[in-house]
Image: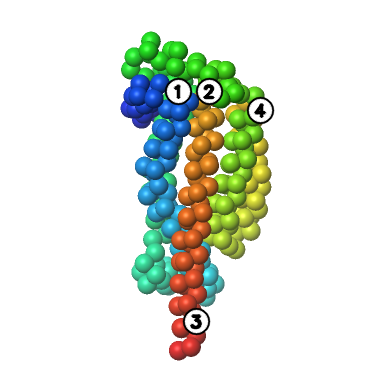
Amino acid sequence: MNALAKPIGYLLQLLYGVIGNYGLAIIILTLFAKLLLYPLYMKQMTSTAKMSAVQPKMKAIQDKYANDKEMMNQKLSELYKEEKFNPMGGCLPMLIQMPIIFGLFALLQSPLQFMGDNDSMIFAVHQSFLWMPDLSQPDRWILPILAGIATYISFSMQNDQQQSAAAGAGGMQGMMKMMKYVFPIMIVMMGRSFPSGLTIYWSISQVIQIFFNMRMNKVRAKLLGTDAKKKKKGGKK
């Protein structure tokens, strides 16, 4: 992660030089990163939403040609072409996002390790912010709980989309439901041991993600609505 964490570290250092407040610099860096990744996120989630619309047709083909794999693959390929859907369309955006997110995580966990002039940032990373006396130290309760709540809301919204896409996969749906509660609890526990600066990043990131998910839900409803209209027209014919 050094290759990605270092340039992000220089950007954080630049933001701090302009703003003079380490906590605000982290928030602005988080906003910048989320906006940068927004097109990739939308592409990934649009692919997931499209999967929800195409899933019933895929299942019908799989059931019909269960004993003829070659014909099944041919019919699925025809379906993907007809629906202009790529089943791997959500993978590449996710793969591009993950290294950037891991780079941010590594930077904010050990900020001085990834900045150019460490001496000028020693006091910055130990600054106070709001109720937190030292951003390099963990906040034991308030910030982790806020991070957990934001994560629960954000994860629940994404979970609903993923469950629709995974319709028919009972085990996967059960795991998603369980993770909706387990993951936020894990975030609270980890937030109590991570530097406050890192937990600020995660909290703000999840709050922004909630708004992204609201937008994505509208896009998904539109896609599913369009698909429903196509079915009605086909039924009339």
Question: Which residue does the numbered mark 3 point to in the structure image?
Answer: 232
Q: Residue furthest top?
A: 119
Q: Is residue 109 visible?
A: yes
Residue under label 2: 129
* Residue 112 quadrant: top left
Q: Residues within 10 Å of mark 3 (few under 14, many from 20)?
A: few
Residue beneath disc 4: 141
Q: Quadrant of residue 77?
A: bottom left
| Amino acid type assigned to the residue bearing label 2 in the image | Phe
Under circle 2, the secondary element is loop
Q: Crowding near pointer 2: few (<14 within 10 Å), some, many (20+)?
A: some
Q: Residue at x 48, y 88 (%)?
A: 236
> In terms of secondary structure, where does tag 1 sit?
helix
**Measured along the vertical axis of the image, is residue 157 above or below residue 230?**
above
Q: Earlier in the sequence, mark 1 or mark 2?
A: 1
Residue type indicated by callout 3:
Lys
Give the alpha-carbon distance from disc 3 to disc 2, as whole Å.
56 Å
Residue under label 1: 22
Q: Is residue 145 above or below residue 181?
A: above
Query: Is there a contact, CB below 8 Å, between mark 1 and mark 2?
Result: yes
